[in-house]
Image (tube, rainbow, N blue to C red):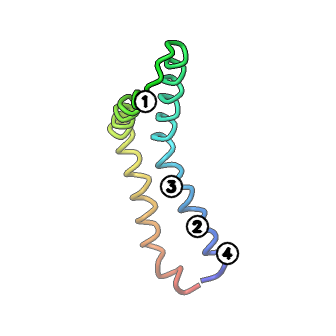
Amino acid sequence: MTEELVMRLGQEALKTTAMVAAPMLGAALVVGLVVSIFQAITQINEATLTFVPKMIIIGLVIVLAGPWMIDVMSTYTVSLFENMAVFVRE
């Protein structure tokens, strides 16, 4: 294994991780922002108020984007295992 191959595999792993995590993180960010604005407007200082909406939205994102996320992960994993012999030889 060359250094270039290791760097490329690491970059692909990080890219795949970011692609899979982005929908959930983005949804949690938006919901957190909306809830914090609501708390600032109404002056409700309850720290646990953000958890339930975030959990509901993340659950919906997993249901809606789950097939795509599984497809991205399975494509990466299959590609990794199919090219394992090539990676070892280099």
Name the N-terminal-most of marks 3 and 2. 2
Question: Residue 10 has which mark?
Answer: 2
Residue marked by disc 1 = 50
| Quadrant placement of the C terminus | bottom right
Mark 3 and mark 2 in contact? Answer it, CB < 8 Å.
no
The percent position of residue 83, horizontal first and vertical second, equals 48, 74
Q: Is residue 23 above or below residue 84?
A: above
Residue marked by disc 3 = 17
Mark 2 and mark 4 in contact? Answer it, CB < 8 Å.
no
SS for callout 1: helix
Front residue (pair 90, 19): 19
Question: Label 3 crowding class (10 Å Cα cut-off): few <14, some 14-19, many 20+?
Answer: some
When asked about the image quadrant of residue 64, the answer is top left
The kind of residue on which mark 4 rests is Glu
When asked about the image quadrant of residue 40, the answer is top right
Q: CA distance from mark 2 to mark 4?
A: 10 Å
SS for callout 3: helix
Mark 3 and mark 1 in contact? Answer it, CB < 8 Å.
no
Count of labels in the image: 4
